[in-house]
Amino acid sequence: MERLVVSAFINAKVYHADGVRQAKESLGHYPISLLLIDTDLRDGDGLDFLVDLRRVKRMPYVVVVSRCVNRRGIIAAFKRGGSGYLLKTQARDEIVRSLRQIDFGFPPLSPKVARCLVDHLHHEEQTPDKMEEWQLQMLAPREREILVLLAKGLNRREIGDLLDLTTNTISSYIKSIYRKLDVNSRAEATLFAVRCGLAG
């Protein structure tokens, strides 16, 4: 992939990491603006590494690369902060063209990945899938109660007043909810609650 990056961005300086550990070290030592993450790293899953990237002050533009089309993996990549998704099986010139489009505001997407995303949006049901059911079961009764109130539009202070808890305690619950549901915002949490029938 290094050659493809150089072909797309002539003056680019490329750093290569063999695995998750080396990638984390590189982020701390080099000014990285574009990060290509393989889904199958030697010492871990590239998608799991995306979660760690959320703690980086200046998160680079992230493009996930993979050998196969995996619907759940593709959705997870974008939910965790990815901005593009390319398949290694694509022709070299197509990958280079996709990377160059970043400068013009177009996310690099392999055609098969784009079709997968469109299909997911067209056929996404308003009922929870097995993963969402499992995530829902992970919530403690109090967390589920707070999720419902969040989905109804109440803010942290209002939820605290209603449940006789401090705002800081509510904030801690919300952080735990977001982590267990793998979401980053109230909007995503609300959508989850609607799909699971917890809010109307």
Image: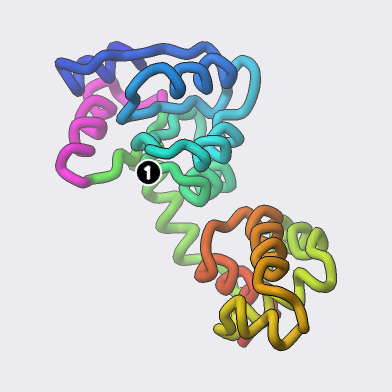
Coloring applied to the structure? rainbow
Q: Quadrant of the N terminus?
A: top left
Please tell me which residue lies in front, 166 or 67. Answer: 166
Against 3, residue 144 (above or below) is below
- Please provide percent x and percent y for residue 77: 50, 43
In-image side of 142 versus 126 (left or right): right
Q: Which quadrant of the structure image shows residue 104?
A: top left
- Residue in the picture at 66% in, 53% down: 179
Q: Which residue is mark 1?
A: 83
Against 190, residue 97 (above or below) is above
Q: Which quadrant of the structure image shows residue 102?
A: top left
Please tell me which residue lies in front, 174 or 112. Answer: 174
Magenta: main secondary structure: helix
Against 85, residue 90 (above or below) is above
In-image side of 194 versus 106 (left or right): right
In-image side of 130 versus 33 (left or right): right
How many numbered tags mark residues here? Answer: 1
Which stretch appears magenta? 88-105
Q: Secondary structure at mark 1?
A: loop
